[in-house]
Structures are given as C-alpha cells and as structure tokens.
Image: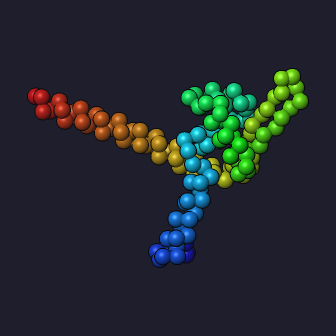
Amino acid sequence: MNNGQIIHNKEACNAAVNAVRDTLYVVNGKWKLLMLVSLMTGPKRFKELQRDMESITPKVLSKELRDLELNGFIKRTVYDTTPVTVIYERTEYANSLSNVINEMREWGIKHREHIKQMSRDEAEARKALVV
C-alpha cells in the first residue's frame, strides 16, 4: 500500500500471495480458528475444548493444540495435580488474529442470511410456477 492505495504490480502481487499463503499455513484447517474463538471466553481444559468443537477427535484436537502452541497462539500450562490438570489459554499474540476472526464472523452471518434469502427466493419462484 502507498498512501492508502494498493499497488498493482508483479512484486506487490507476489508479496500479497506469499503473505496470504503464510497466514493459511498457520491457521489452516477447520479447527484452529474455532479453537481460538472458543478460548476467547477464557482458559479451558482439553475436555472443555473438545466439547466446544463437538465432532473433533482427541487425536486431532491434540495435534491442532500443539500446532497453535508452536506458532505462539496458545499457552499450555500443566499443573501437578492428581490427575494432572492441563489448561490452554490464548496468548497476547493470538489477539493479532482478532480482526480476522471478527471479519470472518461478520461475513459468516451475512453469508448465512444470503443463503437463506436465496432459498426463500427459490421457493417463491417455484410457487409462482405452480400457480
């Protein structure tokens, strides 16, 4: 960007593609962003996260949590209790995705309404054909 203007040239395009690729590499899959959203309400245990994610398997949840921890988005704290207590919480760095998550949430709400409207319009069109 230059004074608020987007530069359209090969180098700028390559830089944009690389930046988006890096982002997708870090937050890819259907679980990571959902897990970060779940942790917005505060620290959680493994089982709490698993309940929030509904159909995620423990194996996949463990892998996704490990990836998020390696990329600095969550902190894993192990407490020496019986049984061992493990708490997961968002880091300050995870807040760098807040705008992205909020935009995705807003878009998702609008998209769901768009699909509902399309369905209503289609039903109306079918009804008009029958009459």
Q: Residue at 43% across / 43% down in the picture?
A: 110
Q: Is residue 4 visible in this depiction of the protein? A: no
Q: Residue furthest front?
A: 59
Is 52 above or below relative to 13?
Answer: above
Q: Residue at 59% across / 54% down in the picture?
A: 25
Q: Residue at 52% across / 76% down in the picture?
A: 11
On screen, residue 10 versus residue 44, left or right, reads left
Is 63 above or below relative to 56?
Answer: below
Q: Residue furthest left?
A: 131
Is 82 above or below relative to 89?
Answer: above
Q: What colour scheme was applied to this rendering of the protein?
A: rainbow
Image coordinates for residue 73, horizontal then vertical, percent:
71, 48
Quarter-of-image position of residue 124: top left
Image coordinates for residue 51, horizontal then vertical, percent:
63, 26
Which of 75 and 29 lies nearest the eye of the viewer? 29
Image coordinates for residue 24, horizontal then vertical, percent:
56, 54
What quarter of the picture does the N terminus occupy?
Answer: bottom right
Which of 5 and 85 lies nearest the eye of the viewer? 85
How many marks do you count on the picture? 0
On screen, residue 90 versus residue 6, left or right, reads right
Q: Residue at 61% across / 30% down in the picture?
A: 57
What quarter of the picture does the C terminus occupy?
Answer: top left
Q: Residue furthest top?
A: 82
Q: Is residue 75 visible in this depiction of the protein? A: yes
Image coordinates for residue 98, horizontal then vertical, percent:
63, 49
